[in-house]
Image (spheres, rainbow, N blue to C red):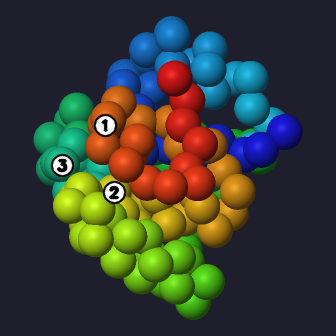
Amino acid sequence: MKPLLLDTNVLIKFLRGDKKIAGVISTYEQILVPTIVIGEYKAGVVGETAVGRQQLSALEMFLDSSAVKVVEVTEDVANVYARVFRVLKANGTPIPQNDLWIAAYAVDLGAVVYSFDEHFGFVPLLERVR
């Protein structure tokens, strides 16, 4: 089975206890979380409040799970990013830069992307949770 790669919007809802998302995630043996997703999560959700500290704690606990692997940008991911960027630009279907990185991770690693953003559908060779 292919690994599941999470987008930030899914991670946020999952860490807030969304049971439907938890059900989907539980069907995969390996969950990939790009460092870009971690950065977006920390920038947008976690603050210096008690709630922010709870959210950071929930993220850290999730990332420590044996099924979860944090993935970083490699030269291979960067090469996929460049190829996909050129294809999307030529097709007139650009997507947000961070989502392009997330797509590049998934294509390079052979993972299925779990996101609520429909623009991932423009990325060739990208499998998504429906």
Residue 22 figure quarter: top right
Look at the numbered disc 1 and give the secondary structure of its residue: loop
User: Which amino acid lies under the numbered mark 3 shown in the image of this protein?
Assistant: Gly
Numbered circles on residues, count: 3
Q: Secondary structure at mark 2?
A: helix
Determine the residue positioned at 84% across, 39% down: 1
Residue under the image location 53 percent in, 43 percent down:
113
Relative to 130, say whether 62 is above or below. Answer: below
Q: Does residue 66 sit above or below 109 in this rendering?
A: above
**Label whose residue precedes the other's in the sequence (3 or 1):** 3
The kind of secondary structure element at disc 3 is helix
Whole-number angstrom distance, CA of label 3 to CA of label 1: 17 Å
State the mark number for residue 117.
1
Mark 3 or 2: in front is 2
Choose between 96 and 4: the one closer to the eye: 96
Eye-nearest disc, 3 or 1: 1
Disc 3 target residue: 44
